[in-house]
Amino acid sequence: MKNLVLPVISLVFAFVIFDIAYSNLEVKSRPGVHTCSGDCYTAYVAENGTIVEQQRAAAEAAALASPVELGRQAYGSCQACHGAGGEGGIGPQLQGRDAGFVEMALTAYKSRETRGDRSNLMWPSAEALSARDIEHLAAFVESL
């Protein structure tokens, strides 16, 4: 047992030294965090505003955006299955559908209702949508 104490202590000491050294290394695949302070932070705030100001500007921009534009932004994740222009693919074609149909379908998927063979693919996507998101997506799909 005594023969293990020194190697274990040495290993722990080496690990602590390595961890301290590695945490300060600049690694390409690992961006630095918390490195913007002092003049860097002042320059960032001058260029971008504070976090609160950025959030306020984003909220104001969203309030001014049309439902179709907000739906276009939300539609990004729908493109993989329904196509960029709603032409269909894995999922059915959405071009030519009216807003009422889209709202009804998304609300049903949000409630985990089965509407076809692949309903289970839509359940997770629809669960994340608010009623307002559904309205915006429906307005955008109708505009396709």
Image (tube, rainbow, N blue to C red):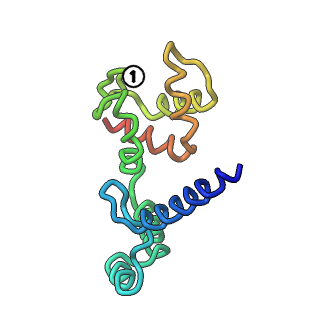
Position of residue 71 measured from the top left corner of the image (x, y, whole percent): 41, 45
Q: Against 81, is 28 above or below? A: below
Position of residue 40 measured from the top left corner of the image (x, y, whole percent): 35, 81
Q: Against 4, is 76 above or below? A: above
| Name of the residue lying farthest toward the right | 1
User: Which residue is at the front of the view, 132 or 123?
Assistant: 123
**Residue at the image point whose x is 43% and y is 71% from the top:** 54
Q: Tell me the SS state at disc 1.
A: loop
User: Which residue is at the front of the view, 3 or 113?
Assistant: 3
| Total numbered badges shown on the rendered structure | 1
Quarter location, residue 49: bottom left
Q: Against 14, is 79 above or below? A: above
**Residue at the image point whose x is 39% and y is 58% from the top:** 65
Quarter location, residue 111: top right
User: Which residue is at the front of the view, 109 or 38?
Assistant: 38
Position of residue 4 measured from the top left corner of the image (x, y, whole percent): 64, 51
| Name of the residue lying farthest toward the front | 3
Quarter location, residue 142: top left
Residue ID for mark 1? 91
Q: Quadrant of the C terminus?
A: top left
Left or right: 93 with respect to 113?
left
Position of residue 48 measured from the top left corner of the image (x, y, whole percent): 35, 75
Q: Amino acid at mark 1?
A: Gly
Left or right: 57 with respect to 88?
right
Binning the other alpha carbons within 10 Å of mark 1 as few (below 14), some (14 to 19) or many (20 upward) gives: some
**Residue at the image point whose x is 43% and y is 60% from the top:** 62
